[in-house]
Amino acid sequence: MKRFDIVVGDITCSDAEAIVNAANTSLLGGSGVDGAIHRAASQSLLEECRALGGCETGKAKLTKGYRLPAKYVIHTPGPIWQGGGLGEPALLASCYRSCLSLAAASGIETVDFPSISTGIYGYPLPQAATVALRAIMDWLSEHELPRRVRMVCHTEAVATIYRQTWNLWYAGEKADRI
Ligand code: APR
């Protein structure tokens, strides 16, 4: 099993043990991938989220997946892009690390991420991809769990940016390219 991969798809159909939700701090649902995950999981997800009392930007909280194929959902509010000078890169990196840390602590072996903050929150994709891949690859180089992490991009255009970024920074050999 490849430890890391970049794929195109709908994260609500993912067969990973846990999928990550690009949430907001209320954890009460929204549009984008948040809305898609809540719709696919059913109302039970919202009821569990209500009991969590929200989540700070850059932190992460775990719930069950309910009707989703994934057993768990890890909710993390990403930073809203405000030009890059208000700590957005550190907060985005913290989202990835918090999710990976929570997954590892829960014994979760496979985790799929969406491209956090790059939709409604407006984080420019190339900058977000660099931050996301650095946080993921740093984590995987120092920890056994998760055994597999994937970036699930909703479109080929998003995947191309992640693949270009990964190949630039992490493909030592041509054979390593994604
Ligand atoms: N599967 C995978 N990726 C998806 C899906 C899906 N079903 N739906 C959307 N995406 C992608 C978007 O194309 C984007 O690349 O997820 C990425 C994150 O976009 P958003 O969902 O808009 O999340 P974000 O930018 O982090 O904004 C979060 O939006 O939905 C609200 O409640 C949420 O307030 C919060 C804000």
Image (cartoon, helix red, strand yellow):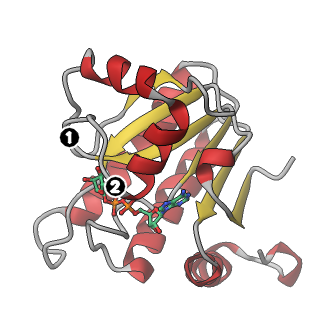
Of badges 2 and 1, the one in the foreground is: 2
Instruction: Classify the position of ligand 1 by quadrant: top left, top right, bottom left or bottom right.
Output: bottom left
Q: Is residue 156 left or right of residue 80?
A: right
Quadrant showing the C terminus: bottom right
Distance (Cα) linking label 2 and label 1:
14 Å
Q: Which amino acid does label 1 sit on?
A: Thr
Does ligand 1 reach within 8 Å of label 1's beta carbon? no
Q: Residues within 10 Å of mark 2 (few under 14, many from 20)?
A: few
Name the residue located 84 percent from the left edge and 84 percent from the top edge.
174
Where residue 48 sits in the image (x, y, percent)?
36, 18
Q: Who is closer to the viewer here, 38 or 105?
A: 38
- Residue behind mark 1: 25
- Residue behind mark 2: 31
Q: In this view, does 66 lie to the left or right of 120?
A: right
When asked about the image quadrant of residue 87, the answer is: bottom left
Q: Which amino acid does label 2 sit on?
A: Ser
Q: What element carries label 2?
A: loop
Does ligand 1 reach within 8 Å of label 2's beta carbon? yes
Q: Who is closer to the viewer here, 21 or 97?
A: 21
